[in-house]
Image: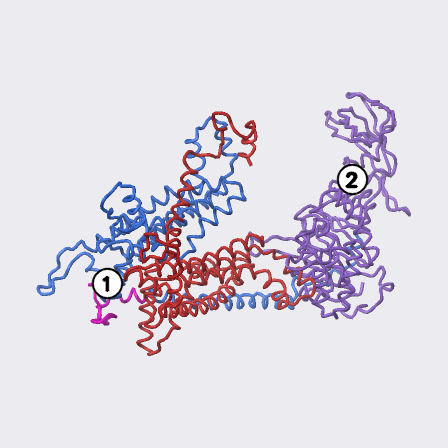
Amino acid sequence: MAAETASVPATSAPAETERLRLAKAAIRRGKLRTRWLLLSPALLTIVLVGLLPLSIILVYSFLEPGTYGGVRWVFSTDAYVQFLFERDLFEDTLTFNPAYLEIFWRSVELALLSTVGSLLIGFPTAYFIATRPPSRRNLWLFLITLPFWTNLLIRTFAMMLILRDEGVINIILMKLGLIDQPLVLIYTDGAVFLGLVYSYLPFMVLPIYAALEKLDFRLVEAAYDLYATRGKVLRHVILPVAKPGLVAGCILVFVPGLGAYITPELLGGGKSLMIGNMIAIQFGNSRNWPFGSAASLILMAIVLVALLVYVRYAGRRRGHG
Amino acid sequence: MADRTLQTTAPGGKPAGRRPFDLKRQTGFSEIAWFCLFVLYAPIAVLIVFSFNDNRSVTLWTEFSLRWYRSALNNQGIQNAAMISLQVGAVATLVSTFFATLAALATTRNERFRGEGLVYAVINQPLMIPEIVTAVATLALFALIKQLTGVGGIGYLMLAHTVFCIPFAYMPIRARLEDMNLTLEQAAADLYATPLQVFRRITLPLMMPGIVAGAMLAFVVSFDDVIITLMVAGPGETTLPIYIFGQMRRGITPETNAVSTLIVLLSVVLVALLFFFGKRRR
Amino acid sequence: MTGDGAAADRTAGRSDRAGAAAIEIRRVRKVFGSGQERAVVALDDVSLTIRDNEFFTLLGPSGCGKTTLLRLIAGFEQPTAGEILLFGSHLEHLPPHRRPVNTVFQQYALFPHMTVAENIGFGLMMQGRPKREIDETVRRMLALVRMDDLAGRRTDQLSGGQQQRVALARALAPHPKVLLLDEPLSALDLKLRKEMQIELKRLQHETGITFIFVTHDQEEALTMSDRIAVMSDGAILQVGTPREIYDHPARRFVADFIGEINILPAELLETREASGGASARVRLSSGQVRLARLPDGPVAAGRVNVAVRPEHAGLQPAGEGAALTGTLSNVVYFGTGTHYHLELDGPGGEGGRFVVELQNRLGAGADHAIGARLGILLTDGSLQVLCD
């Protein structure tokens, strides 16, 4: 036994052979190079065509609008001033104009309301799916995911068919004799709200389900065993587990809702303008690119705040677990 | 599990009087879930039903007919738009899936590296920024480039699509690679496979379902896009969604329903394939 | 030993190599991570020679470095320092696919997108052998592991035991010079494990390939191995045949890790060389003197620990001549035998505990009552002096 170890001359092994060290360094360098080589096509594409444009609109927001779209390379903060004030062309005075502020406020309000609406439907649905037997769960998940992959434009169009003056709801109500005149449903803020809930509902259900899937129902058993009622089990056991999913779901509904374009375009009336449409208009007919750029940046700032809230919350969770 | 044992305790399967206590149940939740499903599917169902309506009306049923499908398929504008959609979708799918595959190979199966978080943030960037902002910003960039170089063409639209397709292609490929057992590659190397052979014989076949899933998602996302295309597309680059968006704003006929039904069908088939194929593989 | 000769007997036939060194590990050190705090020393200056045509087992608790050593031989990890030789030629700079050794992985690592036959033929295909030869070898391997009917199956349709056999056949098919087995039986249930132990022994015998087997299961190691290396904390503590390791543990860890054992304080009186190995006269705490075997290692003079297996001790009436005396505190019946737990007499009543194992005979009843005073019978040679 000891003879085994003693049979090796003690002088034969230096601490680390030069050959080995060089080989290892070469492998490490090679791996690093390969990794960045593999990453560069995707990263370059996204940086050049995804991130670079954002810095361009940052620059544009401090320029003057060109006569037929585009910009004139003259520094100006007018794009931001224009949010709150209207410049009188003849007297060059500024008067307070809340029109754009109202659009922003309406957008935030509609996005928030549709988030709450999705939450009220989405949470019970996610919980219901999570308590199905595993075989049935997959089918439910598939049915919830499918609309998410279906063209948003077409789904909004389907909503138009429901809400129109000659739409399904009005026809049914008139056939039943409940109303004589069609109700004004479409081209209202209410229609936009319904459209947003309908569009982004899957975004709410899926993350909540993902969180609830991990719920250990022995905890629920323990809570009932310790005299909790259904309501208390929901509040003290189920909701805390679902919380990360709830937060993620709310962000996922709020952010696209805030920047929505198709929904207000098709379901909202001329008065139900949201930020998304306003930005699109600035780059289209009304052709004030700097103002559109500034509006984009403000929209991004709001989204960023929402994401920060999420990241901070997610970070805190990780600290606990 | 638990609710099954509870149900079987009721004699004859039918509880007399009160429902047996199910600890997973919450009052009203099942009704809301079914309502949620109804809300999600009823409008689509209406859309599809009225695509078969003989009448010009999109909400008053008269008689079954395929005339709107015939008229849609014979519509030169729709044919052209579908062609553009397919071209843009094919290019964006191929390029973005290829790039995403490379990126997924670099970000998995390795020890963590410095800048990893930043790499993820960049790859997912198209998902984090409101689409309308991406749309106008891309428009601004392309307008600038066109002004400077005088080069135009559909390449710009394809490039814009490629960018937002990358994260969708990346996600399933990465998930697949992360699920993959690293020992398999070691086993292959142990059995005399060179690194290239390991990739060709083991890594690539095993990540193929992820690549297919990524490509399908990328195609669906590209095919469905409205906002970015609306901003970036030049004249003669009208994709199918842009074409029917125009129809919807001008005044709708069941022809729009018919085209919409076909597009929905395409997405559903692709996603259903993906969903059930993916489940079976695991 | 061939020194650092790279031109060793690469071409020598098997009969000539018998007893030659298949694997030599020379002063190998492996450190994971870097920096002062995060660095973990997995292997610390390990040297070892594994002979050709040997069933060699690396035995130790998880984290002792046995799997790391195996992965160094396979080439999945590079040593921080030291040399690894295969039949005299250096291995440490070769990538895994250029080393003529194959591994059976813990979770088998069968390729899920290939059939059983394709899995088994993979190594030969990678070596670029002709298709005829591959088919022929695959057929032979399937017969060898008794899986002839399942060649076309996908690997996820196999049971655990069948997967195990495919993994073995796959690693054996290219006829490696050394087969490395990383806890291959740990995923199987007890009955299957027993079967596979015999199967592995048979395969080793039939193929004549050197097996290096990693396990944390002492019984498995004792049953199958020609020789065992017991490892702990990145070091090899003892190398020997199963009988040597079990009957004559050199270190306290080895004695504790394998089977049950009593460890007693004693005083080393005098040592003597004999043909069967060195032995020594030791005085036990009771004052009685016995002859004990010495380990092949440095032993400090004076106070030492001696070890006695429970089945090597006996019981006798308390009183003169007994090596130790104590009070019976517990009797544990376990079918083939009975354990008698004794509280030993000692200074202040703290003599420690001693377990005696006696075989059960049919019809014999319990003959000692709890609380009885008993003497412990220790014959010369049943005691083993430990190095530490």
Q: Amino acid at mark 2?
A: Gly
In depth, the one of A150 and B203 nearer the eye is A150
Both on one chain, marks 1 and 2? no
Residue at image coords 57%, 65%: A28
Write down the chain letter for disc 2.
Answer: C
The percent position of residue B178, horizontal first and vertical second, equals 55, 56
The percent position of residue A261, horizontal first and vertical second, equals 31, 57
Say if residue B223 shows up in the picture: yes
Instruction: Give the CA separation, mark 1 to mark 2.
Output: 94 Å
In depth, the one of B144 and B50 nearer the eye is B50
The percent position of residue B215, horizontal first and vertical second, equals 49, 63
Residue numbers of the magenta segment: A55-79
Q: Mark 1 — residue?
A: A291
Say if residue A152 shows up in the picture: no
Considering every residue shown, the one lying at the far bottom of the view is B150
Above or below, C242 relative to B170: above
Q: Colour of chain C?
A: purple
